Image (tube, grey):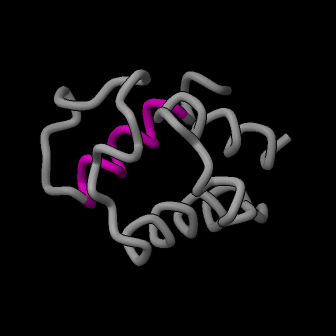
């Protein structure tokens, strides 16, 4: 499921930033994306709604790469 979550996270992050998903990868540094807290909250909420789970915002904020963020999401879904 992690690969599925990673792909969805890349797509949703790209959409929030109005970028092409091909511009992002699992190694993209979250700090370099320039995501606003409201955009990040929207991405988290989309996963919470889709998977009926709770994602701790502060844990998600500490992700260094998109892959780290996907791992946090994956663990919250398990």
- The C terminus lies in which quarter of the figure? top right
Residue 8 on the magenta segment: yes
- The N terminus lies in which quarter of the figure? top right
| Relative height, residue 37 to residue 16 (above, below) | below
Q: Nearer the viewer, residue 64 or 20?
A: 64
Q: Nearer the viewer, residue 41 or 58?
A: 58
Residue at 47% x, 61% y is 43
Q: Which residues are magenta?
A: 6-16
Q: Nearer the viewer, residue 51 or 70?
A: 70
Classify residue 46 as left or right of residue 78.
left
Where in the figure is residue 13, as x and y percent of width and height?
34, 50
Please tell me in which quadrant of the rendered image residue 11 appears. Answer: top left
Please tell me in which quadrant of the rendered image residue 49 appears. Answer: bottom right
Where in the figure is residue 47, as x and y percent of width and height?
59, 57
Residue at 71% x, 55% y is 59
Where in the figure is residue 19, as x and y percent of width and height?
13, 46
Residue found farthest to the bottom = 38
Residue 23 on the magenta segment: no
Q: Nearer the viewer, residue 13 or 62?
A: 62
Residue at 27% x, 31% y is 24
Classify residue 2 as left or right of residue 32.
right
| Relative height, residue 43 to residue 22 (above, below) | below
């Amino acid at each position: 499921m992690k690969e599925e979550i990673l792909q969805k996270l890349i797509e949703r992050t790209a959409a929030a930033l109005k970028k092409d998903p091909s511009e992002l990868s699992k190694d993209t540094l979250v700090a370099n994306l320039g995501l606003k807290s409201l955009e990040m909250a929207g991405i988290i909420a989309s996963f919470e709604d889709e998977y009926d789970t709770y994602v701790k915002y502060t844990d998600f904020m500490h992700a260094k790469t998109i892959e780290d963020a996907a791992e946090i999401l994956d663990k919250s879904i398990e």
